[in-house]
Image (tube, helix red, strand yellow):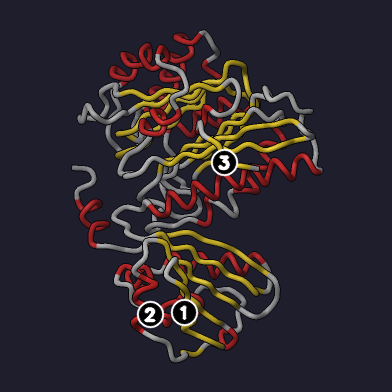
Amino acid sequence: MKQINGGVCAAKGFTANGIHCGIRKNKSKRDIALIYSEIPANAAAVYTQNLVKGAPLIVTKNNISDGRAQAMICNSGNANTCNANGIEIAETMCELLAKEMNISAKDVIVASTGVIGQPLDITPIANGIPALVAGLGDNSEYACEGIMTTDTKKKEISIEFEIGGVKCKMGGIAKGSGMIHPNMATMLVFVTTDCAISSEMLEKALKEDVKSSFNMVSVDGDTSTNDMVSIMANGMAGNAEITEDGEAFYTFCEALHAVTAYLCRMIAGDGEGATKLLECIVTGACDNANAKIVAKSVICSSLFKAAMFGADANWGRVLCAIGYSGANVDINAVDVTFKSSKGEITVCVNGAGVDFSEEKAKEILLEDEIQILIELNTANGTATAWGCDLTYDYVKINGDYRT
């Protein structure tokens, strides 16, 4: 398995585009994106667990209930959520695209991201679709830009892997900066692959993967209304179709996790106002489930996130977050180490503080990627969670997000 270029266009048969159609006032910002497979593909998706769901999620779930899709369209600048005509708008987006591309409207994955509760005018979308379709090509970067809101960095990756001796490719793009919290958040992720895999196995792989990828990301504790992770697999690589558990399926799952884990790190590191990516790695738990509880609790702690912003090695906040997590933990057996490119420093052993250099700890914690290594010394359970520091700019961004 190796990383390659191309994003969502790396896999055979996939093209993409992104343009400014007029939803967003800033004409320099692309605000609509398209991904297209030249042949119908098997498809699967997972959706936010928020009871308030954006209209596009409802329409997408209905459209791909047969496990098939051929295109994905997504606008930014407006979430199309809590609108009286939201379903109608989302369905119309599918119909307009289908007409322009001569495909079925039921084969379209539709998504929206942006402000909740604001009417979405279909006019700029309708006017922009012809140019969006005409510009389809090796333009994963444009599609990536078209789904961004408060994101400051594009998030895309592609890899090559082998199934039964056949080279397959997989690529993904994502958006997500604020309102990020498990279980899934203002996170939109679109994955493409030319690997041949049945829609049933594709859904199984995706649902299992999010448990240890996107559900382990938190920026601010708010679970959004519009998050969705979708994947299209068109089979154009030519491998024997994966229809059951086995070596081929496990290899596919490994490739999928390589893509999703990479995007998780990018989403967490680009949290609104963030200056640091925090990666909490828990080992020695009584099982993986308890390891996940601990990792997520630490990543979600506002006090700990604030300490990381200040490069303060306040390990007591780590212990505090573990203690209220509800996990099955022997707090008197916990070791904590902070690590970055500047080195690592152990700050807690057996649930108690140890002598360490505050100057060295500060040097380590001033880096933009920090690992929090937690050894529970109980058994073999492991988990990783991703988050970011909590800064002044987070409040500034969200204080006037709507206005």
Q: For the residue marked with disc 1, what is the amino acid?
A: Ile
Asked if labels 3 and 2 touch by Cβ distance under 8 angstroms, the answer is no
Q: What residue did someone put label 1 on?
A: 345
Which amino acid lies under the numbered mark 3 shown in the image of this protein? Gln
User: How far, Cα to Cα, is label 1 from label 3?
Assistant: 31 Å
Q: Position of residue 116 (x, y in %)?
A: 32, 40
Residue at the extreme front: 342
In the image, is residue 195 above or below residue 179? above
User: How far apart in space, not on screen, are marks 2 and 3 (Cα)?
Assistant: 34 Å
Assign a secondary structure to mark 3.
Answer: strand
Q: Residue drawn at (43%, 80%), measured in percent from left and top?
A: 315
Asked whether the residues under the numbered discs 2 and 1 touch, taking CB atoms below 8 Å apart as contact, a structural biologist would say yes
Q: x and y percent of residue 66 in the render?
A: 65, 25
Which is nearer the N-term, disc 2 or disc 1?
1
The amino acid on which the numbered mark 2 sits, given as a three-letter code, is: Lys
Quadrant of the rendered structure where residue 301 is?
bottom left
Front residue of 175/167: it is: 167
State the count of labels: 3
Q: Position of residue 16 (x, y in %)?
A: 46, 23
Query: Does residue 68 show up?
Result: yes
Above or below residue 348? Residue 130 is above
Q: Which residue is mark 2?
A: 360
Q: Decide which of 260, 203 is in the foreground and name it.
A: 260
Decide if residue 389 is on the left or right side of residue 211: left
Lateral position of residue 268 relative to residue 157, left or right = left
Taking the spot 47% from the left edge, 37% from the top edge, the residue there is 173
Measured Cα–Cα span from mark 2 to mark 1: 8 Å
